[in-house]
Structures are given as structure tokens and as C-alpha cells.
């Protein structure tokens, strides 16, 4: 966010999270800024009481303490879509049995509830896109929740209101169970930003809830807080979270942080491209506005990384068999260095729709998984862990430059030229590992073409690199291939082709 527009809008968002703002309504009443620092409580019929004390009292991470507004003030709506009503939503009203009886709601089908975040509504383009993708994928009840009367500025009030919205969703699901035979074990909540924490508040009231997917859970006022305050693994039988904009604004003095959180929030947490910055998210805001219009263009210019999770999630539904495989690792740096090539005892998982296929050891939670993506739909890309052994024969010399590979499968598919590493020193006897990605589907390797280019500034003579062997691990297929170079010498700018070997 380097432009004036991005800076101003980011500043507004951050100040909304950190400075006192006037209340638009009188319930619950807050008499003064000082009162915001004292634990308070409000109770609503059927939902119970909400306090700013206990685990919610955190003057470092939540400097202003506001109570949630009333259910009547927030007034969420539920629009049902099914394969029999894809275009026009059918309104479901809590306590009104006829609204459900007249609809196409079928308690025997799985139910997906899509929950938007701050300053959005239930008819956003991304919500409709996700709804359509889900209905193409399966015969679901898809409910688009709209809580836009409770998610406006100030941000502090919106965060407080998430608790009431979560309680109301839980109340709705319990009612559908009692009156229509629905089961929470078939409900899946998909929440973006503040909506992720709304899902958590609903889930904590619904033991046995099937699944929650947190789509870049909001960071400000949630990062580093007690699990009761934010989405956490106890909120559903399975909780998965995708992080795309994880540098918290409140921890960034230069306002270059993000709107999401890096802290794990689920049984498994996915960090595409490291979870902080996403590819192709540095578009000039003027160009973004020209392409997407003033409202959408401005929003994407400021919050592209935070919003990227939405088409990412939808793509995992539309392209169900796509390569969204993620790998357990302790850091993105180690992942990129090729040190997390295998799935280990924890196992790998597919980010997004297929995440619940993951079968970890009992009691596992907070597992960080990494993958890379492209910057455009469908976003998936293939991962290869590469190990290069540099020869240590007597005439081998240290080199500095780039190493490239072209992959070829047993059936003749070829990749484009792929960079193994760039501007790296290669010492005799070194064994270098790296992660290589390719948009081309090339598996069951038969041959590779190896080339390199030196980057010595003052080199006059022909530069040569001696390679002993190269090993490649295909992430998707988990197949390992060995290619023996036997200390061959490769001139800078030239290439050699190696066939697969059983041993060197």
C-alpha cells in the first residue's frame, strides 16, 4: 500500500479500530470513554449475557471495550438458495415456521452458511460467486447471511456485534434442529474476516457443529487474544483457516500491515504464499478502479491480500481436483527452501473445500501448512522439491548464478523453463535444496533439461558448473525421481538432458 489512496483508506480503517467513535444508537449506552475501560455487561432474551470483562478485557489488544448492540438493532437476515432456487433467495425467519415450510430448505441435505465481514453485506459479488460454486458442486442448502446493519463503523462496535450475530446463528440452527429435524453435524459455516470470528462464536454454542472455514480471520482486536475471544479449534468438529493478509495493522507503525491474522485459528491453518502478501496484489489503484469501478476498485486496491482468500476458496470448490495441496512446515522460509517436501506423520491437506479430507493424528490442532499459488484463477500451481548435488572433483569451482530445469514426463509433456534458484553461490560439494513451482502438469518424470547462467560481473573466460546429481520430489504425486549427471561440466548458457536413473 504505497499510494496516497491506499494510505488514506488504510489509515481510516486502522483509526476506526483504535480511536473512540460516536455511537449511532442508544443501546447499550456508553456514557464516556472512561466507561469503555471498565468491564460492562448486557443481556438479551434468548441469547444470554455479554460482558467486556474476563477474557475479553484486554487493554493491549482491545483498547476500547464496547458492548454488542441488540439483536433487533443488528437484524440479520438469512437468504436460502438451493438447486431449485439458485437465482432468487428465499427468506428464512427465526421463529416463523411458515418461512421455512414454504422454502426449499431440506433438513436431510448439508447446509452451508456464508458469512461476510466488516462493511460488507450478504449480496456481495464474492458471496454470490461462492454460492453458485457450492450449488454446482453439491446439492446443498446455501444460506447467505446479511448482518450489514451491525458491521458498520466504528470497527470497535462491529467487533463487539460479532458476538451477538454468532449467538443468533446458533439460535437459528438449534431452532431448525428442533422444528425441522436438521442436524448441526451437517452444517458448515464459511466466514470471511470478522465473519470468521462470528462463525467461532456460533460454534462455541453448538457442540458437534460439523465444520467452520475461516477465510482470512480478522486480525485487529483478535490477534493474540484468548481462544474464547476469537476463532479456535474447539468451535467445531473441524476448523480450517486460510490466511492471506496476516500482518496485523495494529502492529505496523507504517500502516503496511494487513487486515488478517497470522496466528493459527484451526485444526489446520493454510498460508498460501506465506500468508502475508499475495501475487499480483500490487496493482495501481487507478488501474484497479478503471477495471473494477470506483467502489470495487478502491476496495481491491487497499485490501487485495485480504480479499484474495475469497476467489481462492471459491476456486477450490469450482476446481475440486485442483492442486491446492499444502505441506506442513514450521515456516514459509523453510518451505521455500525445499525442506518440507514430504507430508510426514502429520500428513498433507488440500486447502479449501477438500480440507476436511485431512486425517491427522488424534488431538492434532494448530498445524501450519504452506503452498504457493498463482495470481489469477484458478490459482493452483504444482510444487516440486529439488535437491542439487554440486560436484567436488578437483577442477570444480565455486560459481554464482541461476539454475534452470525443464521437466519432461514419461508421456512427453514438457514444462516451461523453471527456475530452481537465482543469484546463488554454488560451492563444490554442496547439496542445495529448493522449492520449484510450475503451472504445467508434468508428472512421472522421465527426463530433465538442465541449464545455468553465471552472474559474475567481470568474468571473461567461459564459466562451467559441475553437477553430480539432481533429485526431484513431485508434491502432488509424492513420487521421487533421480537424475545422475556424474560430474558433468555445463557451460554457462548451455544445457544438457538427463534421463531418470535408479541409482548413481
Image (cartoon, helix red, strand yellow):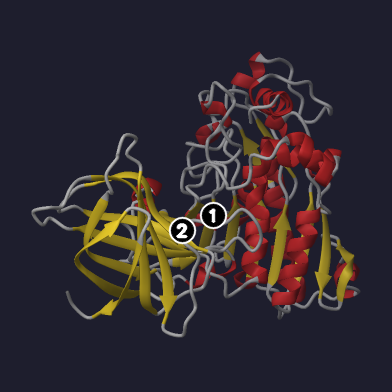
Q: Provide residue 371's location: percent of width, then percent of height.
A: 47, 57
- The foreground one among 22 and 475 is 475
Q: Residues within 10 Å of mark 2 (few under 14, many from 20)?
A: many
Quarter of the image with the C terminus in it: bottom left
Q: Which mark is residue 30?
A: none
Whichever of callouts 1 and 2 sits on the residue coming sooner in the sequence is: 1
List the single residue furthest toward the bottom.
411
The residue identified by callout 1 is 241
**Residue shown at 51% from the left, 73% from the top:** 441
Secondary element type, mark 2: strand
**Residue shown at 37% from the left, 61% from the top:** 364
Secondary element type, mark 1: strand
Quarter of the image with the N terminus in it: top right
Q: Provide residue 462's location: percent of width, then percent of height.
A: 28, 49
Query: Viewed as shown, does residue 329 lie left or right of 199?
Result: left
Q: Provide residue 269's location: percent of width, then percent of height.
A: 48, 54
**Residue shown at 44% from the left, 72% from the top:** 476
Circles 1, 2 touching at the beta carbon (< 8 Å): yes
Query: Viewed as shown, does residue 46 lie left or right of 470?
Result: right
The residue identified by callout 2 is 268
Q: Which quadrant holds residue 103?
A: bottom right
Q: Is residue 88 above or below residue 330?
A: below
Q: Which quadrant holds residue 360?
A: bottom left
In 3D space, how far apart are the residues under numbered discs 1 and 2 (Cα atoms)?
7 Å
Q: Provide residue 472's location: percent of width, then percent of height.
A: 32, 68
Amino acid at each position: 500500500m504505497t499510494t496516497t489512496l491506499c494510505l488514506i483508506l488504510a489509515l481510516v480503517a486502522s483509526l476506526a479500530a483504535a480511536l473512540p467513535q460516536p455511537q449511532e444508537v442508544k443501546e447499550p449506552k456508553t456514557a464516556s470513554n472512561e466507561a469503555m475501560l471498565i468491564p460492562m455487561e448486557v443481556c438479551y432474551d434468548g441469547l444470554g449475557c455479554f460482558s467486556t470483562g474476563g477474557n475479553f478485557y484486554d487493554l493491549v489488544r482491545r483498547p476500547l471495550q464496547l458492548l454488542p448492540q441488540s439483536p433487533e438493532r443488528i437484524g440479520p437476515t438469512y437468504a436460502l438458495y438451493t438447486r431449485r432456487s439458485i437465482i432468487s433467495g428465499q427468506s428464512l425467519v427465526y421463529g416463523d415456521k411458515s418461512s421455512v415450510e414454504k422454502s426449499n430448505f431440506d433438513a436431510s441435505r448439508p447446509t452451508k452458511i456464508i458469512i461476510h465481514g466488516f462493511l460488507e453485506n450478504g449480496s456481495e459479488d464474492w458471496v454470490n460467486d461462492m454460492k453458485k460454486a457450492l450449488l454446482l458442486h453439491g446439492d446443498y442448502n446455501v444460506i447467505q447471511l446479511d448482518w450489514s446493519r451491525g458491521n458498520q463503523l466504528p470497527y470497535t462496535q462491529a467487533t463487539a456485534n460479532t458476538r451477538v450475530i454468532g449467538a443468533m446463528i446458533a439460535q437459528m440452527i438449534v431452532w431448525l434442529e428442533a422444528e425441522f429435524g436438521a442436524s448441526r453435524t451437517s452444517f458448515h459455516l464459511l466466514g470471511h474476516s470478522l465473519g470468521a470470528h462470528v462463525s467461532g462464536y456460533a460454534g462455541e454454542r453448538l457442540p458437534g457443529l460439523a465444520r467452520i472455514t475461516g477465510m482470512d480471520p480478522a486480525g485487529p482486536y483478535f490477534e493474540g487474544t484468548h481462544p474464547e475471544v476469537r476463532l479456535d479449534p474447539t468451535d467445531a468438529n473441524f476448523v480450517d483457516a486460510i490466511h492471506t493478509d496476516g500482518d496485523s495493522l495494529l502492529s505496523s507503525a507504517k500502516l503496511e500491515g494487513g487486515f488478517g491474522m497470522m496466528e493459527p485459528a484451526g485444526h489446520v491453518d493454510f498460508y498460501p504464499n506465506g500468508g502475508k502478501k499475495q501475487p499480483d496484489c500490487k496493482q495501481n489503484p487507478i488501474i484497479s478502479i478503471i477495471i473494477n469501478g470506483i467502489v470495487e476498485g478502491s476496495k481491491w486496491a487497499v485490501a487485495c491480500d485480504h480479499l484474495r482468500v475469497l476467489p481462492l476458496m471459491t476456486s477450490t470448490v469450482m476446481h475440486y481436483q485442483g492442486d491446492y495441496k499444502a505441506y506442513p512446515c514450521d515456516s514459509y522460509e523453510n518451505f521455500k527452501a525445499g525442506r518440507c517436501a514430504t507430508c510426514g506423520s502429520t500428513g498433507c491437506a488440500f486447502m479449501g473445500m477438500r480440507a476436511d479430507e485431512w486425517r491427522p493424528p488424534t488431538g492434532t490442532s494448530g498445524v501450519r501448512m504452506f503452498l504457493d499459488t498463482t495470481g489469477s484463477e484458478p490459482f493452483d500451481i504444482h510444487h516440486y522439491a529439488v535437491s542439487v548435488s554440486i560436484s567436488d572433483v578437483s577442477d570444480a569451482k565455486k560459481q554464482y548464478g541461476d539454475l534452470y530445469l525443464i521437466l519432461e514426463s514419461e508421456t512427453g509433456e514438457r514444462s516451461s523453463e523453471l527456475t530452481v534458484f537465482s543469484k546463488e553461490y554454488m560451492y563444490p560439494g554442496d547439496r542445495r535444496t529448493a522449492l520449484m513451482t510450475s503451472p504445467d502438469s508434468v508428472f512421472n518424470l522421465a527426463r530433465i533439461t538442465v541449464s545455468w547462467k553465471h552472474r559474475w560481473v567481470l568474468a571473461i573466460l567461459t564459466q562451467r558448473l559441475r553437477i553430480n546429481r539432481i533429485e526431484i520430489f513431485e508434491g502432488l504425486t509424492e513420487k521421487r525421481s533421480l537424475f545422475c549427471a556424474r560430474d558433468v561440466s555445463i557451460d554457462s548458457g548451455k544445457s544438457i538432458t538427463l534421463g531418470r536413473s535408479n541409482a548413481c
